[in-house]
């Protein structure tokens, strides 16, 4: 009887050990940070994310229409840049496709949007992070953030998950504010 208990205990131990090993080996290796400047098309190819469609998201039609009117009603160039990361699954992975879908619905050519891939320590690419510090010296770089350039004016909208869905109308409001300041 004593030997049977030892054998059963040994079997339970070995089974548990292999279950733990199998579970740990099934985890996907994290994607390496993609760092640098990308178009949306390039980002989709390199990010390692499974879905880029934002199929669960319908842009706020009022915000889209207002932004579209602003974009089409000015004689200056409005540039959009997005600071993001492929390693930020809680915020960038759901919000970046939504941001792109929103801007596209407002009439922006998404491949004209510059996406800056930032590393985990937010130090690379060096020139991009220096640009951030020059534009926003007192602010942390939250990911994702949309930066808006109109003429010599610059502004930003933090677009993390906690900011959703409010960032849609904040983007429109920031564009309107910059246009008012530049008149």
Image (cartoon, helix red, strand yellow):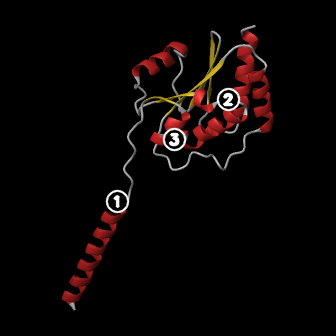
Q: For residue 120, say whether it is visible.
A: yes
Q: Position of residue 13 (x, y in %)?
A: 27, 73
Camera-side residue: 84 or 73?
A: 73
| Badge nearest the viewer, 3 or 1 | 3
Q: Are marks 1 and 2 in contact (CB under 8 Å)?
A: no
Q: Position of residue 170 (x, y in %)?
A: 71, 28
Relative side of 74 to 96, left or right: right
Report the residue at 29% width, 69% height from top: 18
Q: Earlier in the sequence, mark 1 or mark 2?
A: 1
| SS state under label 2 | loop
Q: Residues within 10 Å of mark 3 (few under 14, many from 20)?
A: some
Q: Earlier in the sequence, mark 3 or mark 1?
A: 1
Report the residue at 26% width, 83% height from top: 8
Q: Earlier in the sequence, mark 2 or mark 3?
A: 3
Disc 3 from disc 1: Cα separation = 28 Å
Q: Residue furthest bottom?
A: 1
Q: Which residue is mark 3?
A: 44
What's the mark number on residue 54?
A: none
Q: Is residue 10 above or below residue 156?
A: below
Q: Which residue is mark 1?
A: 24
């Amino acid at each position: 009887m004593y030997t049977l208990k030892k054998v059963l205990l040994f079997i339970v131990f070995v089974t548990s050990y292999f279950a733990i090993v199998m579970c740990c080996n099934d985890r996907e290796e994290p994607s390496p940070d993609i760092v640098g400047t990308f178009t949306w098309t390039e980002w989709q190819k390199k990010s390692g994310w499974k879905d880029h469609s934002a199929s669960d998201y319908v842009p706020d039609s009022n915000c889209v229409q207002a932004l579209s009117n602003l974009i089409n009603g000015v004689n200056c160039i409005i540039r959009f840049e997005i600071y993001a990361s492929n390693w930020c699954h809680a915020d960038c992975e759901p919000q970046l496709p939504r941001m792109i879908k929103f801007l596209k619905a407002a009439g922006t050519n998404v491949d004209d949007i510059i996406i800056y891939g930032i590393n985990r320590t937010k130090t690379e690419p060096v020139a991009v992070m220096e640009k951030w510090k020059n534009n926003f010296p007192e602010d942390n770089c939250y990911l994702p953030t949309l930066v808006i350039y109109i003429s010599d004016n610059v502004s930003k909208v933090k677009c993390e998950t906690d900011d959703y869905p409010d960032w849609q109308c904040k983007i429109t409001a920031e564009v309107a504010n910059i246009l008012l300041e530049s008149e």
